[in-house]
Image: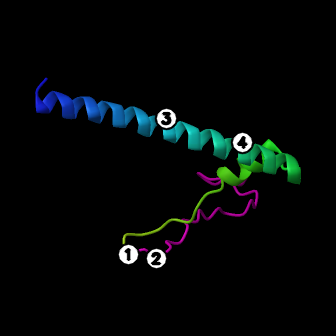
């Protein structure tokens, strides 16, 4: 076996070990989250609402960009188009 083949085999073994540690850490974190949710009575709906909260927009310079606002006209009962004929 050449040196290159040995190094590639070591690399494959290291990649497998890294993947196993990631999975182990993920499982431990998930167990911690589940136990804390049970301890404090946090529901899945609350967790989902927190995860889906929108974060403020950030520009290229790192400053928060203002939200775009859509201005709607108040409903006055006036229809658009040509005015009605008056007799």
Real-space CA distance between mark 3 and mark 2, rounded to the nearest whole angstrom: 40 Å
| Mark number, residue 61 | 1
**Which residue is more in the foreground, 80 or 74?**
74
Q: Is residue 29 left or right of residue 64?
A: right
> What element does badge 3 sit on?
helix
- Counting residues from the start of the chain, the first of labels 3 and 1 encountered is 3
Q: Nearer the viewer, mark 3 or mark 4?
A: 3
Q: Which residue is mark 4?
A: 31
Are dots 3 and 4 in contact, CB under 8 Å?
no
Q: Which residue is mark 3?
A: 20
> What element does badge 1 sit on?
loop
Q: Is residue 74 left or right of residue 9?
A: right
- In the image, residue 75 sits, relative to residue 34, either above or below, namely below
Q: Is residue 70 magenta?
A: yes
Q: Can residue 46 be seen in this snapshot?
A: yes
Real-space CA distance between mark 4 and mark 2, rounded to the nearest whole angstrom: 37 Å
Q: Residue furthest front?
A: 1
User: What segment is highlighted magenta in the picture?
Assistant: 61-87
Q: Which residue is mark 2?
A: 63
Name the residue at 59% across, 52% down.
82
- In the image, residue 16 sits, relative to residue 75, either above or below, namely above
- Counting residues from the start of the chain, the first of labels 4 and 2 encountered is 4
Name the residue at 42% across, 40% down.
18
Q: Where is residue 40 drawn, in percent x and y?
A: 87, 54
Real-space CA distance between mark 3 and mark 4, rounded to the nearest whole angstrom: 17 Å
Are dots 2 and 1 in contact, CB under 8 Å?
yes
Q: Is residue 58 left or right of residue 4?
A: right
The local crowd at label 1, few if under 14, some if 14 to 19, many if 20 or more residues have their Cα within 10 Å, is few
């Amino acid at each position: 076996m050449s040196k290159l083949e040995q190094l590639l085999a070591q690399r494959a073994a290291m990649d497998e070990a890294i993947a196993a540690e990631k999975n182990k850490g993920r499982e431990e974190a998930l167990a911690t989250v589940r136990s804390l949710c049970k301890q404090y009575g946090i529901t899945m709906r609350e967790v989902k609402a927190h995860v889906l909260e929108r974060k403020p927009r950030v520009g290229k310079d790192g400053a928060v960009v203002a939200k775009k606002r859509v201005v709607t006209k108040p409903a006055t009962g006036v229809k658009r188009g040509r005015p009605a004929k008056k007799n």
